[in-house]
Amino acid sequence: MNEIEYLLAAILVMAISTYLTRLTPFLMFTPGKENAKLNFVAKNTPPMVMMILVIYMLKEVDYLSTEIFYTLFALAVTVGLQILKRNALLSIVSGTIVYMFFVQM
Amino acid sequence: MIKTALKTSLPILFGFIPLGIAFGLLFQELNYPWYFASLMGIIVYAGAAQFMAIGLLAAGVGLVEIAMSTFLLNSRHMFYGIAFLESFGNWNLRKLYMIFGLTDETYALMTSINIPKGFDKKKYFFFITLFAQIYWVLGCTIGALSSEILSFNTEGMEFAATALFVVLLIEQWIMVKRLLPFMIGFIASFIALMFFIDHMLIVAIIISIGSILIFRLIKKSHDE
């Protein structure tokens, strides 16, 4: 197997693996059936996952350097704007600009 | 509807373009032609897994190991589809594509938005999914093509992904307004970080779903 063949095979294998994870629930559960437990899980998973994803994104922050200060500041800008204006784009762009400003300083 | 879907998907643009560029730039270090980065964005379409793949490819790891690591890393996605069992509609190519496009970002966005009146949910979700993938492929391609052309300092741009999830967390709070799932997610994350830092996401999700089911059981037996 030459290098390009290896890369192509790896990409294919990754594509299949990834698709399988996303396809699994659709094969396991039948939609439309009254399943109180499943509906309950479906309803409660998004808030839990969002919380987990936010913490996941922040887990690499170095709490002993100045990084923690500008990260918190950029987060405050994002949260504050989102609560006040409810405009996702504005909140994300503003928070990111603040963050980039401090990182590149 | 396409216009509204485009507008709704824009927050993902700000997450995916810089992240995709970062991936493309790293991918260049493998010295493969640039279009393989685009190809990965098109047929794999998984942010974290693509970043991981750079390390695996550089080390020349075997295909079985690549398959298993990808599967493990993406196993959290097994819980995402549950929210869309009905809203993706009947089995057809569109549904297969929407399942393919169910990334962290699209899942987060599509569970946090209200569908405008008169819109066909399936089509609306389809266009959001499609636009999101276009942003990702664009990002990967720009990054893979442009290590020398890129004069703009993108350092810190990756914060956009964090900001996106923070915004969607607030939107979830406005929609759900019950403290319990947020608390569970919070505590589960810290347990997972403490004991399973390498597999934090999947462990935290399993603990969360397990816990919320236990709470449901307790409440049920309490009510009876």
Image (cartoon, coloured by chain):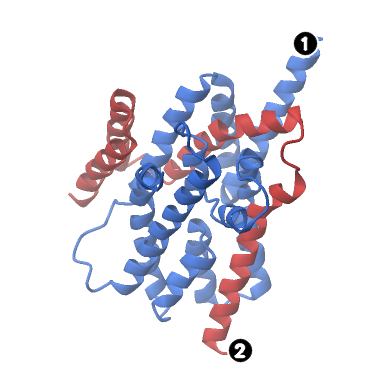
Chain colours: A red, B blue
SS label for mark 1: helix
Count of picture labels: 2
Rate crowding at label 1 as few (under 14), some (14 to 19) or many (20 or more) other CA atoms within 10 Å: few
Q: Residue A104, how many percent across, how many down?
A: 20, 52
Are dots 2 and 1 on a single chain? no
Q: Which residue is the extreme one toward the bottom? A: A2
SS label for mark 2: loop
Question: Residue at image x 54%, y 70%?
Answer: B56
Mark 2 — on which chain does it sit? Answer: A
Against A90, residue A1 (above or below) is below
User: For this view, does B188 lie left or right of residue B211?
Assistant: left
User: For this view, does B131 lie left or right of residue A96?
Assistant: right
Q: Residue A64, how many percent across, how many down?
A: 35, 40
Q: Nearer the viewer, residue B98 or A55?
A: B98
Rate crowding at label 2 as few (under 14), some (14 to 19) or many (20 or more) other CA atoms within 10 Å: few
**Quarter-wise, where is residue B216 in the image?**
top right
Q: Which residue is the extreme one toward the top? A: B223
Q: Residue B108, how many percent across, how many down?
A: 49, 41
User: For this view, does A78 lie left or right of residue B126?
Assistant: left
Q: Nearer the viewer, residue B177 or B182?
A: B177
Question: Residue at image x 41%, y 64%?
Answer: B137
Question: Residue at image x 61%, y 47%?
Answer: B76
Q: Residue B115, how many percent across, how many down?
A: 48, 34
Inspect the image, locate mark 2, and give the three-letter code of the amino acid beneath it: Met
Inspect the image, locate mark 1, and give the three-letter code of the amino acid beneath it: His
Q: CA distance from mark 2 to mark 1?
A: 62 Å
Question: Residue at image x 42%, y 28%?
Answer: B170
Q: Quadrant of the C terminus of chain B?
A: top right
Mark 1 — on which chain does it sit? Answer: B
Give the residue number, with chain letter if any, for mark 1: B222
Give the residue number, with chain letter if any, for mark 2: A1
Q: Nearer the viewer, residue B162 or B110?
A: B110
